[in-house]
Amino acid sequence: MPELSVVVHGPNTQDRLTGLLASLAAHPHPDVEVIVAAVGAWAHEAARTYAPEILVLPLPDGTDDAAARSAGAARATGRWLHFVHAKDGLPVGGPRLVADRVADLPDEVDVLLFDHVSSTWETSLLPSDDGPRLARSGRAAHPLDAVARTALRVTPLLGNRALRTAFWQAHEAELTTPDEPFAAYATLLLADHIAALNQVAYESRELRPESLPPVTPEQHFALVDRYEALLTIAQHRTTTTATTTATTTAPVAPAAPPTTPGAAPDPVQAVLYDVMVRDCLRTFARTRMPDATAREFFRRASEAAVRHRPPGHRRPAGPEGIRRALLEENAYTRYRAFQAANRARRATKAAVRTRGRQAAAAFGDRHYRKSLSRPVDPNLAVFSAYWNRGVACNPAAIAAKLTELAPQIHPVWVVTAENACLLPPHTDHVIPGTRRYREVLATAKYLVNNVNYPNAIVKRPDAVHLQTHHGTPLKRMGVDQMEFPAAAKGLDFQALLARIDKWDYSVSANSHSTRMWERAYPSRFTSLDYGYPRNDVFYSATAADIRAVRDRLGIPPTHRAILYAPTHRDYEAGWTPRLDLATLADSLGEDTVLLIRGHYFYDGTPSPLTALRRTGRIIDVSAYDPVEELSLAADALVTDYSSIMFDYANLDRPIVVYADDWETYRSTRGVYFDLMAEPPGQVARTQQELTEILTTEAWRDEGASKARAAFRRRFCEYDDGQAAERVVRRVFLGESEDALPPVIPLERRTPAPSPREAV
């Protein structure tokens, strides 16, 4: 008997079912069975491709969601059920997370709640508000009364909860309804105990309203009917509980009524009532309805608010309390007037804020222009990296070497306020928008960045702008992105070219980069073919340094460490690992540690790795800096199209390319060469292939070594451990090319020792 039956149900709306089933088929799990209640010919056609591994149950067109769920559940053999609508999605590893959690739950638990992300026709993988709520519930199981304030405010989806199969069978009649939010709330009202999982295991996809039938007045009114029915269930639940308790404790005495004057309201009814009123008011305020429909909706909501108001209930203070009072009075006209007044007040405040920002910007511009009249300070250098994230990358290596070779030049870093606390001690820095920020940018002799400074920064004739870049380009960059809409989205190419025209120097790691920078950034800058300063550490690090990094990361000395560092996709808004990392870790064995680093573009999105950290074989290093230390700690690198492969190749350690979506990436982003034809090592196109490479000697065999040697000759051309010195001597000290340390030939370079050698 599997732990979990995933019941996929519904029609193949906009062909969403195809991707969902492909993901499930690519990442099977022995404790998870998949049943597809396929509604209509298109859904059946899409699903039968994955039979017999996936059980397909064909259903006729027009079968509603409730009937499809019931049909799928009737064929399920798992102890638990997870209902997944065919239009929605499951993150890689999501079913495994749920199956592992329910396996530990006692039989008294009927419902497991978990977190989800949401996608629309415009956005992808937006975090929900449920995560903190679920986190507060902990891992223990609770009756609903104990967690009503949390559980009843979790988004009402059947997809973000698993149901014990016996519980579903006992209450199937009450839960079989096309109204999914009703069914979702009802599962909680009928459950004995509820548990929580503070991990994302579901993706709710919202269809574009214009692709759906128009909403009828009856559908609007049904919202009120839904909550009235739920409150009736809640009241019956309270009455039953009170009667049972009274009978158990005092069989002779009559049962006490569920509520008495002055008594505290039942927590379940109180929270559900609050949810109803909020939802009705929000729907009324945000939904366009004809006036007659809006009046009738408001009237029905008013009657429900009065009829079901719990004893002792108190309205909140402030505007929300006023809204509720007007609703209870059925004061439609006054409510509309209150709405209009609020909109006018918000518009006035927004206008005041806008004028304030404009005044502050104008003042800042005047201050910056005034500062430009001051002499350039020959001993002042401004540094920035990754849009003011902190001390990192090539600028950090240059700044360190500058302190050694030219201590008279004072470095100042530009860093955002939220990252300032992460700076190394005693780092002089400025916050964007401040008075000193404008002064140092206006008067510094040297401006160093691995991206670009803002458009408003003026290029003074006697100032030097040094562009260091932050990777060797595989993907199209600069103006080469113009023919690729996904990559070019939101880019102002005229502004980009204006920024490029401020460059005096462009640092390059190899001839390929030099040629591509000149193509992608057509301007008059001078190319410095010196290597990337950030890669100097790959030739200067000692065995002790490597042991220290691995110790900080918690990697046992005898274990193999594999760094998985994928890049971002322009056609995806968030990051979901393209690998089932838990399964991969299991396959690689207990003597292998996976270091997982998500791309920095995805900061702020929910991490899909949290549940895997507890195993000790997966370490989330997405926030670890500097990334060069991760490379030093790793025995091998697994990546897709990230520029880290070009840097890591300096270490002459194995690299495996996992390219499951190469054709899509290549066509949407554009590339400068065919990585599949010129890889740095073995190439895997599926997880199975990757597993085979990493569990045999293929990851470091003769073929992989030959591919890596050719790759190093081409892309590690100038990296020899002296790049930062060459940059400082040429740019800051004004030395001639002939006086700079020559590039050491590749065959004479000695990279840092491998982790095995360091042990």
Image (tube, rainbow, N blue to C red):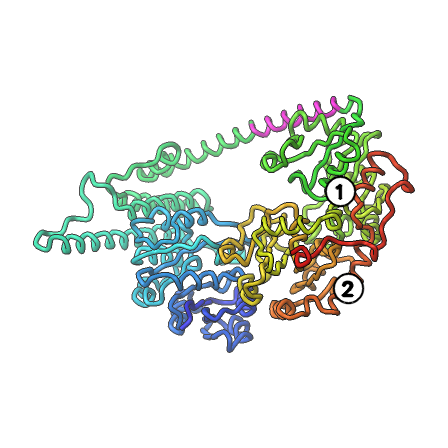
Residue at image coords 29%, 51%: 231
Which one is earlier in the sequence, the residue at label 1 or at label 2? 1
Where residue 432 sits: x, y (%)? 65, 32
Specify start and end residues of the magenta stretch as a single range: 353-371
**Which callout, 1 or 2, points to the residue nearer the camera?**
2
Instruction: Tell me if residue 227 is in the magenta stretch.
Output: no
Where residue 192 sits: x, y (%)? 29, 58
Please report contact status of discs 1 and 2: CB closer than 8 Å, yes or no: no
Q: What crowding class fits label 2: few (fewer than 14 Cα within 10 Å), some (14-19), or many (20 or more)? A: few
Residue at image coords 60%, 49%: 602
Residue at image coords 63%, 25%: 359
- Which residue appears farthest toward the bottom when viewing the image? 52
Residue on which disc 2 sits: 678
Instruction: Tell me if residue 368 is in the magenta stretch.
Output: yes
Residue on which disc 1 sits: 496
Image: 508 above or below 177: above
212 lies left or right of 485: left
Q: Is residue 537 visible?
A: yes
Q: Secondary structure at mark 2?
A: loop
